[in-house]
Image (tube, helix red, strand yellow):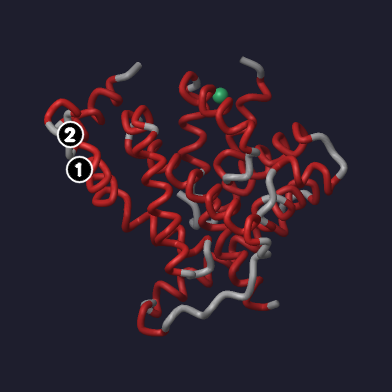
Amino acid sequence: MWPVRRQLDSRFERLDPETGPDWDDRLIRELYNEFGGPLLRQVRQTTGNDLQWAEDVVQETLLRAWRNAAKLTWERGLLWAWLLTVSRRIVIDGRRRRGVRPREVEPPEADSIAVPDDADKTLAAIVVADALRGLSADHREVIEQTYLRDRTVNEAAAILGIPPGTVKSRLYYALRSLRGVLKERGVAS
Amino acid sequence: MSESSHLEVAAYALGVLDDGDVEAFERHLDACERCRQELKTMSELPGLLDGVKSSSERAN
Ligand SMILES: [Zn+2]
């Protein structure tokens, strides 16, 4: 069951803990090399292009990965998915701690965004918004009351007056159908 | 493991699972190939939803 684990280990195996006291530094550097750039791009979208905050989130995420060395044995796709969930929790926690609601974002600097990329993003956002409207009311509602408003499952459950388990299962079926629609329309892979 | 454990993968992928549940779900993930696959397929959705979020924020 773990051939992948073995293969992935080889990515980090030259970072043998026995080989020296700077193992930690090298592991962190390796994580940055491997995931830092793509993670920053993802996180910037979540933080509304607040670059300073996004960099802090990336750093905290990679530190958590470093502290959870067992995760580093996961295959790349899974490790990436894990890093994304960790970074989102950090952003959501950060917003709640500061008591900030999702706010108006600074428009990205014109020269930092290539026009076709921006146009693609806008188009994707239109397709996603349309797909959301196509979901059942229950499904759309749990996505809106959790992710789109930076709320956890328990908070959304309290607001909606339904058990947390119901929020979790609705979210599950909601994401599955959302993904099905987006895949059909060529926006999700 | 109960069926409801598998369903938490969506909340986990979105990063909205409460702290107390995250650890338990990660233990589940260690043992559940089905959820590992599902997490990967769901992991691009939050990024796509971010696009909707920031465009509606701009409109507000
Ligand atoms: Zn499972």
Q: Amino acid at mark 2?
A: Leu
Element under label 1?
Answer: helix
State the residue in front, A90 or A11.
Answer: A90
Q: How many neighbours does mark 2 have within 10 angstroms: few (below 14), some (14-19), or many (20 or more)?
A: some
Image location of residue B18, percent across then percent down: 65, 38
**What residue appears at the point 32 percent right and 54 percent down from the top-left corner?**
A36
- Asked if the residues shown at circle 1 and circle 2 are in contact, with their CB atoms under 8 angstroms apart, the answer is yes
Which chain does tag 1 point to?
Answer: A
Give the number of the disc on residue A164.
Answer: none
| Residue for badge 2 | A15
Q: Could you give the CA–CA distance between mark 1 and mark 2, rounded to whole angstroms?
A: 7 Å
Does residue A97 appear to the left or right of A110 in the view shown? Answer: right
| Residue for badge 1 | A26
Image location of residue A26, percent across then percent down: 20, 43
State the residue in front, A136 or A166.
Answer: A166
Q: Ligand 1 quadrant?
A: top right
Image location of residue A137, percent across then percent down: 80, 51
Element under label 2?
Answer: loop
Residue at disc 2, CB closer than 8 Å to ligand 1 = no
